[in-house]
Image (cartoon, grey):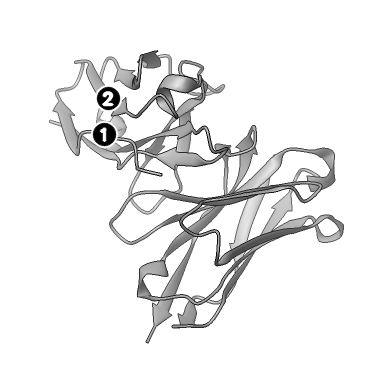
């Protein structure tokens, strides 16, 4: 059974960099698929952040592209998200997911982790 | 990229059918058969209900069905049940090789 688990600081100061990791179990990232990040501000809708292949090809949301880096570490079977220069608007629950194709989340999601940006 | 347009809320009584629409453009919904629908209960991660417009993942009830006409996709839930009460989101692949979500629809089972 494929499982994903997000981890990282729950509190980040404004202007700093948000860093999250998604650990994958039950499936080897090296075997294929794209992997992605999605976020949801409290009480609001879903926003696609970006995706990465097992070999490192990336796709990013144009509105976040200048601040986002997604990377993969196949040796640890995990992938990561970095979002720089955060503001209060980046406060959200961040989800990682395995994808269908290059951008579409499948039925495999992490439970989500709340990241709050403090001033 | 602009979010896809969904009604903010829909409601129905148990046993009835409801339809949620998802309107985009020819650069997303209308241009690709890559529309998906997600169900999200409070405090939970979204769950994939429909992919590629009308395909159901294994384990999803056949009471859920999807379709598309032009730039508008639809999710229909038949035989409405109390556990169907949730938020529903559509998503679509775009011509920029990105993903765009709808704003979400809150389904209330009366």
Do the residues at discs 2 and 1 belong to one chain?
A: yes
Q: Is B58 left, or right, of B53 in this rendering?
A: right
| Residue B80 appears in the figure | yes
In the image as oriented, which residue stretches furthest toward the right? A75
In the rendered image, which residue does mark 1 sit on?
B6
Residue B11 in which image quadrant: top left
Choose the circle earlier in sequence order: 2 or 1: 1
Quadrant containing the N terminus of chain A in the rendered view? top right
C-alpha gap between disc 2 and disc 1 = 6 Å
Residue B50 shows in this picture: no
Query: Cβ–Cβ below 8 Å for labels 2 and 1?
Result: yes
Q: Label 2 is found on which chain of the structure? A: B
Observer-nearest residue: B31 or B15?
Answer: B31
A87 w.r.t. B98: above or below: below
State the residue position of label 2.
B21
Picture residue at 66% right of the left edge, 47% below the top: A3
Q: Residue at x 32, y 20 (%)?
A: B74
Instruction: Give me the chain letter of mark 1.
Output: B
B104 lies above or below A88: above
Q: Is residue B7 left or right of residue A90?
A: left
């Amino acid at each position: 059974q494929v499982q994903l688990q997000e981890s990282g600081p729950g509190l980040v100061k404004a202007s700093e960099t948000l860093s999250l990791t998604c650990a994958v179990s039950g499936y080897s990232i090296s075997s294929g698929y794209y992997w992605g990040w999605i976020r949801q501000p409290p009480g609001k809708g879903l926003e696609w952040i970006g995706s990465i292949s097992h070999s490192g090809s990336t796709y990013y949301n144009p509105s976040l592209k200048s601040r986002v880096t997604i990377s993969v570490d196949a040796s640890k079977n995990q992938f990561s998200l970095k979002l720089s220069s955060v503001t209060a608007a980046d406060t959200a629950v961040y989800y990682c997911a395995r994808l269908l194709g290059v951008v579409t989340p499948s039925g495999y999601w992490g439970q989500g982790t709340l990241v709050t940006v403090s001033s | 990229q602009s979010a896809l347009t969904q009604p903010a809320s829909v409601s129905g009584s148990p046993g009835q059918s409801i339809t949620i629409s998802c309107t985009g453009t020819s650069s997303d919904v209308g241009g690709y058969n890559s529309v998906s629908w997600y169900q999200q209960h409070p405090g939970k991660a979204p769950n994939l209900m429909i992919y590629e417009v009308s395909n159901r993942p294994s384990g999803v009830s056949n009471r859920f069905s999807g379709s598309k006409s032009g730039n508008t996709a639809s999710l229909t839930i038949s035989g409405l049940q109390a556990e169907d009460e949730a938020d529903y989101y559509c998503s679509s692949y775009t011509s920029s090789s990105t993903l765009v979500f709808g704003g979400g629809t809150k389904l209330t089972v009366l």
